[in-house]
Image: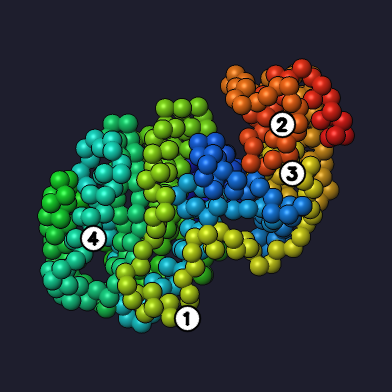
């Protein structure tokens, strides 16, 4: 499946070329997450994401390596566990949720049940006020599922429960567009047309009561996923998993890049902000504020107990803390100074790419490279290559170099900002710091 996707994207035909292109795509995707997270950190300096995978928990950062997966990860850094605003944590959390959902779907289908994917949306109009719109949307969803009529629908179609996930996209033309995907667990195959008619009508009424409206796309029961038995049967046999399964659709919607620029997912926004699209910054901030503390994935009451009897539900924060791979070994450790150099060079992602070789000497060579490059450019170019905006003195007391030293030591500080302040200094501080670094 991945090779087909690569061929579509690149026109590459041979298997070898496809493997290389796939690996490049994967590398870019991984590095892209680090860049997007960095943007989120700058946009939300007071949120947990600001120190995610930056702030050290102790005196060293471990580089963990898995030879089985040819992968590398950090250990010993704080993580935020925010599925909404942190592309790194979201990728990890979503992957775990996907595995869990696949287990649930698999066990339900194995016991003779059927699972469908439903999508609830509203008509595209221009909505600017996300908090108000989201509230109306969620109220409409809640009311559509309450009451005797909803109970009758559940009974009529043998619905034992649902798992739903909230999503939102944004476009310049239409503003915010919240929607919801829902896995519907039924005791057996259902009459799809009948369900479509009944539920769509109920959704339309509920939406209109909240002052919103739907069009012909307001409700969709995905027939492709009408019976997921085929998919589940394939799962585990294919060396490369299908990139977009039912469970993936549900857990990773916000990771999608969005089609073109029409409807941007929040993470696609971060990607564009990284490319200089500053007008999207307030849009992302509004989204972050609005979704903070909300659950991404919600199991209807009793369903989890029915399908995942012995599996305790783990919070997003706990999932984000879990080790990446069980087979990982310690490849090496970075000191506080080395980690500082990595941060200063925005090289967190690149270093892991080097570490994927499993060769610690290559990692050390990479560290030396960026450290030397950094010092040379710092001294010769006066930090100008590192500055993205004119220096802002803020509360900095230029008479007190101690403030700068403290800021330099503090992993919460934006390194670029501290560098800007150092550049403004008369130089005495710079000399003492470079002496310290050496
Ligand atoms: Zn995070």
Mark 1 highlights which residue?
310
Residue 122 in the figure: left or right of residue 20: left
- Determine the residue positioned at 39% across, 49% down: 291
Q: Nearer the viewer, mark 4 or mark 1?
A: 4
Mark 4 highlights which residue?
142
> Which circle's residue, 3 or 4, is located before the other in the chain?
4
**Is 317 in front, or is 397?**
397
- Determine the residue positioned at 42% across, 68% down: 101
- Cα separation between marks 4 and 1: 28 Å
Check disc 4 and report its element: helix, strand or loop.
helix
Q: Nearer the viewer, mark 2 or mark 4?
A: 2
Quick check: marks 3 and 4 in contact, CB under 8 Å?
no
Cβ of mark 2 under 8 A from ligand 1: no
- Cα separation between marks 3 and 1: 40 Å
Quick check: marks 2 and 1 in contact, CB under 8 Å?
no
Residue 112: x and y, percent? Answer: 32, 81
Q: Nearer the viewer, mark 2 or mark 1?
A: 2
Check disc 3 and report its element: helix, strand or loop.
helix
């Amino acid at each position: 499946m991945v090779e087909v996707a690569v061929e579509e994207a690149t026109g590459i035909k041979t298997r070898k070329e496809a493997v290389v292109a796939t690996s490049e795509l994967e590398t870019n995707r991984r590095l892209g997450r680090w860049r997007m997270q960095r943007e989120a950190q700058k946009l939300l300096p007071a949120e947990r994401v600001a120190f995610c995978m930056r702030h050290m928990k102790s005196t060293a950062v471990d580089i963990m390596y898995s030879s089985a997966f040819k992968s590398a990860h950090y250990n010993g850094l704080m993580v935020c566990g925010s599925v909404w605003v942190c592309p790194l944590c979201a990728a990890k959390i979503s992957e775990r949720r996907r595995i869990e959902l696949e287990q649930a779907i698999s066990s339900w289908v194995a016991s003779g049940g059927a699972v469908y994917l439903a999508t609830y949306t509203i008509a595209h109009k221009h909505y600017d006020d996300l908090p108000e719109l989201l509230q109306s949307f969620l109220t409409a969803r809640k009311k559509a599922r309450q009451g005797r009529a909803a109970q009758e629908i559940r009974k009529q179609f043998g619905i034992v429960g649902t798992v739903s996930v909230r999503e939102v996209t944004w476009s310049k033309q239409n503003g915010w567009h919240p929607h919801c995907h829902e896995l519907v667990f039924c005791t057996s195959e259902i009459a799809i047309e009948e369900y479509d008619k009944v539920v769509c009508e109920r959704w339309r009424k509920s939406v209109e009561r909240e002052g919103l409206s739907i069009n012909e796309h307001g409700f969709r029961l995905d027939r492709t996923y009408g019976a997921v038995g085929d998919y589940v049967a394939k799962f585990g046999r294919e060396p490369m998993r299908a990139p977009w399964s039912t469970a993936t659709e549900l857990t990773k919607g916000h990771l999608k890049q969005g089609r073109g620029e029409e409807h941007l997912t929040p993470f696609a926004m971060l990607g564009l902000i990284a490319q200089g699209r500053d007008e999207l910054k307030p849009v992302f901030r509004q989204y972050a504020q609005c979704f903070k503390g909300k659950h991404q994935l919600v199991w209807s009451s009793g369903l989890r107990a029915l399908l995942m009897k012995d599996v305790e539900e783990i919070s997003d924060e706990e999932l984000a803390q879990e080790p990446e791979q069980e087979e990982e070994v310690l490849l090496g450790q970075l000191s506080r100074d080395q980690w500082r150099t990595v941060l200063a060079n925005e090289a967190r992602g690149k270093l892991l790419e080097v570490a994927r070789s499993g060769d610690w000497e290559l990692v050390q060579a990479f560290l030396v490279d960026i450290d030397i490059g950094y010092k040379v450019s710092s001294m010769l170019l006066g930090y100008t290559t590192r500055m993205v905006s004119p220096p802002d003195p803020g509360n900095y007391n230029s008479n007190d170099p101690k403030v700068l030293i403290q800021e330099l030591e503090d992993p919460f500080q934006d390194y670029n900002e501290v560098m800007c302040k150092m550049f403004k200094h008369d130089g005495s501080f710079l000399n003492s710091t470079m002496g310290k670094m050496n």
